[in-house]
Amino acid sequence: MHELTYAQAINEGIREEMRRNQKIMVLGEDVGKYGGVFGVTRGLFDEFGGERVRDCPLNEAAIVSFAIGLAIQGRPAIAELEFMDFTTFAMDPITNQAPKLRYFWGGQVSVPLTVRTPIAAGLGFGTQHSQSLEAWLIHVPGLKVAMPSNAYDAKGLIKSAIRDPNPVVFAESIGLYATKGQIPDEDYTIPFGKAEIKRKGDDVTLVALGLLVPKALKAAEELAGRGVDVEVIDPRTVAPLDIETIIASVKKTGRLVIAHVASKTGGIGAEIAQQVVERAFDSLDGPPVRVAAPDVPIAASAQLESAIIPDVADIVKACLSFRNARA
Amino acid sequence: MTLSDEQQIEALRRMWQIRFFEEAAIRLYGEGRYRGSTHPYIAQEATALGVCATLRPTDQVLATYRGHGAAIAKGADPRGMMAELLGKATGMCKGKGGSMHMSQTDVGFLGCNAIVAGHIPIAGGVALAQKLDDTGAVTAVFFGDGASCEGVFYETLNMATLWKLPLLFVVENNEYAISTHVSESISVPNISMRAQGFGLPGVTVDGRDFYAVYDAAGEAVARARRGDGPTLLEAKTVRWGRHSAVAAGPAGANIDKWKLTDPIPRFKQELLQRGVVSEAQISDIERDAKATIDDAVAFAIESPYPELSELQTDMYA
Ligand SMILES: Cc1ncc(C[n+]2csc(CCOP(=O)(O)OP(=O)(O)O)c2C)c(N)n1
């Protein structure tokens, strides 16, 4: 075992995969000598050189599209977009090209593409650098979306993403980059579509994504002190989504809370709630509850932003909101 | 590079195949045999052939929804294409692509793409892979005058020149983007002038002149193979018909102009003058091309539709 931060764990995952497979490429803005605006690709340029770790001009659409061109030529490509908000400039390759080429060409190519992009929610960057746009992406058939919540998962998931012969958007949380975790010394991966039950509980099923997983665990601890036993589930990937684990939990608890940083309307919370309603309605004691950002642009002021980004107290409140809650 | 007689004869054969393919596509659309639309390559045949005659089987071509010509020029199978057009299981993409997404990767045809200009930066990535593979292979990417207004075109011009990629940009200026004439959308008289701002060679040729296209493309491809980087080649032509089988737009507005410059009779004339073929041979080649397309149509019509189970296949590798 060794200790790494979430950012270092991603770095180590990429590094190991690039050693395993000489064809893997990294493209992005400032990813080379500089090591990435958040240092996630630090040292890769020195080890693998500028041919494989390529600093690109400022053009997100071309970066992702070039990565697709490499991928369909048998070179798995990792494209970095500096903030998730900038996926907008690359939405054509991310939504119209990468997840569809294989299908509309009848299986003639595969697209081993990983688009790494961080979410900066809660850090005061203002609304064009703080959005969580994963719900846009799960709406596109053919696209996989990972949202790691800790260092261990981040490494295992980035390795799976890189090995996956299909396009993946890897949504990192900048707020978690400095969090530390124990990393095994041997090679491991974490499969997509397999949720982790982070804490067992009988009273409420609490599904949390990315940045909110550590907050959900804190909320669960607090609630335990008040006699409410919360089961915390981290889906780890939202496409594919491990709905089975969530449904099994709801069948036990009868109550569902979904917590994410993204704004509420049309968020992944809505999708999870609806799938549970469709398949486990009779097990529910009441309507599923969403903890999410209100539907406003993310304001920069610390005062305003802290009212937007869901916190431990919001999660606690949601878990206590059920009419027949035991606490 | 010099062309053998066989290559020139094959170019004529494929020009006719394209023309007959597109005429059949329009007819079959009128008969209600497929839905959506189709974007004929008629009057642009000499460009696809002039470019592809400079390429090797291991080179790659990417094209637009108006890409049936590039497909045939690169060696795609007309049967698979026609069946794809009709949405049949025997189509090159199993009926999932249709008119605007045909591809045949085993002949180096990396497809038609229906997002205007979306394929241009993908072609850049393909060319980057070729450069890293260091096999001397090149990529040619076809697109229209309208596409040359999209931002990704400029992003790719910059990156491809910066990285000296083995890429040939072929902008087919047929004067119209649906209803918009180039005079209303493009700030320079020749699209090849765009190259000046990016530091790559830009050349304009008559896209209806097979030999002019061949010579310019040959130079560009040789340059790319040497590792000297991309070229922007503008092939001027005239769109004689509508934008597509369904879209409005100046239908036949250019037809008189076009008939005078139809690339096929022109190429035929040159072949005769150069003594490459005789009149009798020409008739045989035309008949042969017609037979190929008639066979493709019959094959496509007789082929079954895909099973519904195909809906879920080819989603993931
Ligand atoms: C991104 C995008 N915008 C608009 C369209 C609709 N559209 C399809 S073809 C076309 C005109 C393109 O003209 P040009 O690039 O000159 O090519 P041509 O059709 O003449 O071959 C338009 C606007 C599209 N398919 N994709």
Image: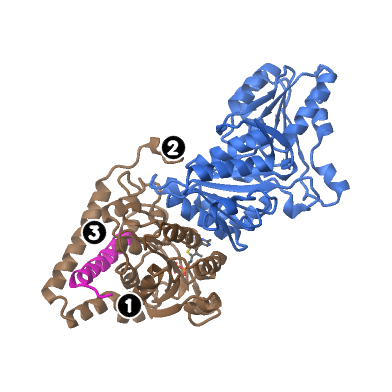
Query: How many discs appear?
Result: 3
Q: Residue B312 got which mark?
A: 2
Q: Is residue B249 magenta?
A: no
Question: Which chain, by letter, is brown?
Answer: B
What secondary structure is the stretch in magenta mostly built from?
helix
Q: Residues within 10 Å of mark 1 (few under 14, many from 20)?
A: some
- In the rendered image of the structure, the colour used to display chain A is blue
Q: Nearer the viewer, residue B219 or A274?
A: B219
Q: Is residue B184 positioned above or below B32 on the image?
A: below
Residue type, label 1: Asp
Determine whether, in the image, residue B66 is placed left or right of residue A326: left
Look at the image and give the residue range highlighted in magenta.
B1-27
Return the x and y of residue B171 as percentages of the image width and height.
44, 71
Q: Quadrant of residue B42?
A: bottom left
From mark 1 to mark 3, how far is it between C-alphas?
29 Å
Q: Nearer the viewer, residue B201 or B172?
A: B201
Residue type, label 3: Ile
Q: Secondary structure at mark 3?
A: helix
Q: Is residue B87 positioned above or below B222 on the image?
A: above
Pointer 1 residue: B215
Q: Secondary structure at mark 2?
A: helix
Disc on the earlier residue, 2 or 1 = 1
Q: Quadrant of residue A8?
A: top right
Q: Have a look at marks 1 and 3 and say if they share a chain.
A: yes
Return the x and y of residue A83 as percentages of the image width and height.
68, 52
